[in-house]
Image (spheres, rainbow, N blue to C red):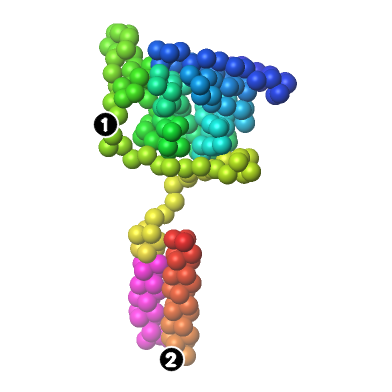
Amino acid sequence: MSASVPKDQAIVQRLQAPDSGDRVWFGYGNFVIRQGDRALSLPYVSEPRFGDSQHRIHFENWTAPGLAWGSGLAWSPESRYVLIDWAAGANVHQRITIALDLQRRAVFEFPECIPFKRFVHPMVFGEGIFGAPDAPIFEFTGKEEWTASAVEPGHAGKVASRQPMLDRHAWWGLVIGSALGCALAIFLAAPYLSSWTVSRSLVVLFFTGLVGWLLLRRRRE
C-alpha cells in the first residue's frame, strides 16, 4: 500500500543530498534537494495505481523531459551528475534509470532500471554479492550518448513524452511496401478488370504514394 500524498501541495520538503553520493529517498510530495550550491526541484505530478509517485525535474531554468519516480536519487559529490529513476510521462509504468548532467542540461538513459545505491562519478555503486556494500555496477567512460533536452519554462506543464516511433527507414519501408503491394494486386487482377478500372487504380496508387511521401517529409522536419 503506497503512502498518501500530502493534502497541502504547497508544502515543500527540503533535503540535503549526502556528500558521500549515497542515495537519498524522496516521494509523495513536493521536494527540493540540495547538493553544494545547487538545488533540484521535484514537484509532485501524479501517482500511477500501485506505483510510486511521479515528479517533474526542475533545475534552475531547465525542465528535464519525462518524470522522476519518487524512489530516491543519488547525487555525485561534485554536484554535476544525478542518478534517478525515470518514466516517459504521467501514469506511465515504464521505469528506467537516467543520469542528468546539470552543467550541459543533458540526459543519459540506461537501458533498464539499475539498483544504484551510491554515485561518485564516474562510478556507480550497488549492492554486491551476499549483500556486500559498494560493489561497482557501472562506470562512465565518456563514450556514452547524452541527449541535450529542455522544456521551455512556459510549457513546463507539458511533460515530454519519449514513446517509441517509427524512424525514417521504417516509414520508407511502409510507403514502398504498401505501393508494391497495391501494384501487385492490380497486376494480378488486371485480366478481370476493365482498362478504366485499372487506370483509376493506378491513379489512386500514385496519390497514395504521394501522400505517404509528403507525410514522411513533414515528419522529418
Against 217, residue 2 (above or below) is above
Q: Position of residue 120 (x, y in %)?
A: 35, 19
Q: Position of residue 107 (x, y in %)?
A: 42, 36
The residue under the point 55% across, 43% down is 151
Residue bearing the label numbered 2: 195
Amino acid tagged 2 = Ser
Instruction: Assess whether residue 156 is covered by the magenta stretch.
Output: no
Amino acid tagged 1 = Thr
Assign a secondary structure to mark 1.
Answer: loop
The residue under the point 47% across, 61% down is 221
The residue under the point 72% across, 20% down is 7
* Other-residue count near label 1 (Cα within 10 Å), few / some / many at <14 / 14–19 / ≥20: few
Mark 2 vs mark 1, foreground winner is: 1
Q: Quadrant of the N terminus?
A: top right
Residue bearing the label numbered 1: 141
Q: Residue furthest bottom?
A: 195
Q: Say the numbered circle drawn on residue 59.
A: none
**In the figure, is residue 145 to the left or right of 87?**
left
Against 176, residue 124 (above or below) is above
The residue under the point 43% across, 70% down is 213
**In the figure, is residue 215 to the left or right of 136?**
right
124 or 170, nearer to the observer: 124
Q: Quadrant of residue 186?
A: bottom left
Instruction: Assess whether residue 182 is covered by the magenta stretch.
Output: yes
Q: Kindly report the secondary structure that dominates the magenta region of the rendered protein.
A: helix
| Labels 2 & 1 near each other (Cβ < 8 A) | no
